């Protein structure tokens, strides 16, 4: 069975479904807007698109094995409470999507509480994450579907010191999905990074820069794909990541990069595009971190159509920089708001199989092979 990565057209927002060779599913963020739920509105019904890709369990519940919230911005969690069951498994009713396991970083809420007011969906997610942590503290690893949680990175002030069995350290690997080993996936946790001893650094670690960054390695049918997903992480974090990993840059390599913050210039530069225009300067270290593209790599902007103006995000200058990154590896830049057309965007679906990574056309024609990361071909160095 091939694995799949599907990017849904959700305007300036993120919503990505990873389907593993095992059949397990990982949903990263959701942005189901009110317009998408309105049958009289032309906005793509991404809730239906998602539901059509999910399976039902033995209790007839549509489910995802994992839901990961990269950070608590509204454009990453809209529709969560309306379309997903949050609460005790036994209280599930109607036909909401059942979440077997949550992946959550406490730091995205710790820093959000200092710098950013949470929307209702983010508050609901935070409440659910805390409920699941309490269940673990009561019952340990014996918790079942609907109560599981995996903590991504240590909280501040020792608040996660008793959660070691469900805690993944920064730089560590996630190799379980809903409590089960899955040989078709590993994910390196690269961020959120802990604060250093430099007090001035805290100002840079805003809600966006506390985004979860994961580098997945996905294998299926003898082929492989490295997928880098990074929420809204901005330039300060990419600088730190390059300084941290420049001697093992393969940790940042990718076949697919979901461009951070919806193709924002602020992930590549401290300068404002709307103020300086073509006089902006690229931050070399941040660009280096985001330049580890493998042969035939794709960079995907989950955003509105990109216009040649002073908008940010998406930013046409960032698009040009990503295209420049991809040129030497013969890669492709794509935008969810423009695929397959600007007027009628549809889910962008990639398959990982025997021949590596392939883009499956919106018309469901034969997949177009865009890289050949076969396990027997390109090495998979150290995660």
Image: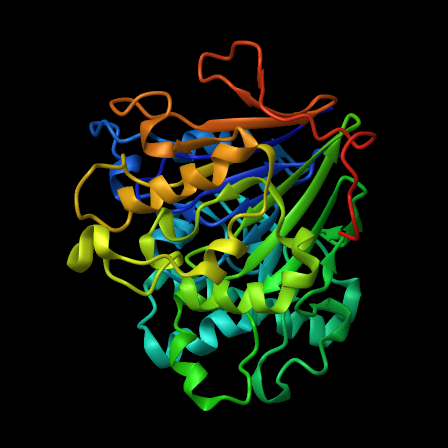
Q: State which quadrant residue 22 falls in.
A: top right
Q: Is 41 placed above or below 257 here? A: above
Task: Name the foreground residue: 278 vs 99.
Answer: 278
- Quadrant of res 358: top right
Task: Kindly identify the residue that appears in the image at 36 percent across and 47 percent down.
Answer: 262
The total number of labels drawn is 0
Residue 341 % position (x, y)? 31, 21
Res 179 visible: yes
Q: Is residue 351 above or below residue 198?
A: above
Q: Observer-nearest residue: 32 or 264?
A: 264
Q: Residue at x 28, y 63 (%)?
A: 271
Q: Is residue 379 left or right of residue 240?
A: right
Quadrant (top left, top right, bottom left, bottom right) of the N terminus: top right
Where residue 301 sits: x, y (%)? 40, 40
Q: Position of residue 281 (x, y in %)?
A: 32, 58
> Is the residue 258 above or below the residue 179 in the image?
above
Q: Position of residue 214 (x, y in %)?
A: 60, 55
Between 350 and 373, the one lying in front of the other is: 373
Residue at 65 percent across and 80 percent down: it is 160
Residue at 27% from the left image edge and 25% from the top image edge: 342
């Amino acid at each position: 069975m091939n694995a799949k990565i599907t990017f849904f057209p959700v305007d300036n927002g993120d919503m990505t479904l990873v389907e593993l060779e095992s059949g397990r599913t990982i949903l990263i963020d959701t942005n189901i807007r009110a317009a998408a739920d309105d049958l009289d509105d032309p906005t793509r019904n991404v809730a239906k698109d998602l539901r059509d890709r999910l399976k039902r369990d033995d209790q007839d519940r549509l489910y995802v094995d994992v839901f990961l919230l990269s950070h608590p911005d509204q454009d990453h969690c809209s529709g969560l409470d309306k379309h997903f069951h949050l609460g005790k498994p036994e209280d599930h009713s109607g036909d909401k999507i059942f979440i077997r396991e949550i992946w959550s970083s406490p730091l995205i809420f710790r820093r959000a509480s200092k710098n950013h007011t949470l929307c209702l969906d983010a508050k609901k997610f935070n409440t659910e994450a805390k409920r699941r942590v309490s269940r673990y503290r009561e019952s340990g690893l014996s918790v079942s579907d609907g109560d599981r949680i995996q903590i991504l990175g240590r909280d501040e002030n020792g608040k996660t010191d008793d959660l070691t069995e469900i805690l993944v350290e920064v730089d560590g690997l996630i190799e379980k999905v809903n409590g089960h080993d899955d040989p078709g996936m590993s994910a390196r946790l690269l961020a959120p990074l802990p604060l250093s001893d430099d007090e001035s650094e805290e100002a840079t670690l805003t809600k966006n820069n506390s985004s979860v960054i994961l580098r997945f390695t996905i294998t299926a049918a003898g082929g492989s794909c490295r997928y880098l997903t990074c929420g809204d992480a901005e330039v300060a974090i990419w600088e730190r990541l390059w300084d941290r990993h420049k001697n093992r840059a393969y940790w940042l390599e990718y076949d697919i990069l979901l461009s951070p913050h919806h193709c924002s210039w602020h992930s590549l530069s401290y300068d404002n595009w709307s103020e300086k225009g073509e006089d902006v300067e690229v931050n070399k270290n941040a660009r280096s971190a985001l330049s580890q593209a493998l042969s035939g790599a794709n960079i995907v902007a989950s955003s509105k159509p990109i216009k040649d103006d002073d908008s940010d995000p998406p930013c046409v200058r960032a698009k040009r920089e990503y295209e420049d990154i991809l040129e030497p590896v013969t890669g492709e830049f794509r935008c969810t708001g423009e695929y397959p057309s600007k007027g009628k965007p549809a889910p962008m679906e990639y398959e990982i199989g025997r021949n590596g990574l392939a883009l499956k056309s919106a018309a469901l024609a034969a997949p177009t092979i865009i890289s050949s990361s076969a396990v027997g071909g390109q090495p998979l160095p150290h995660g």
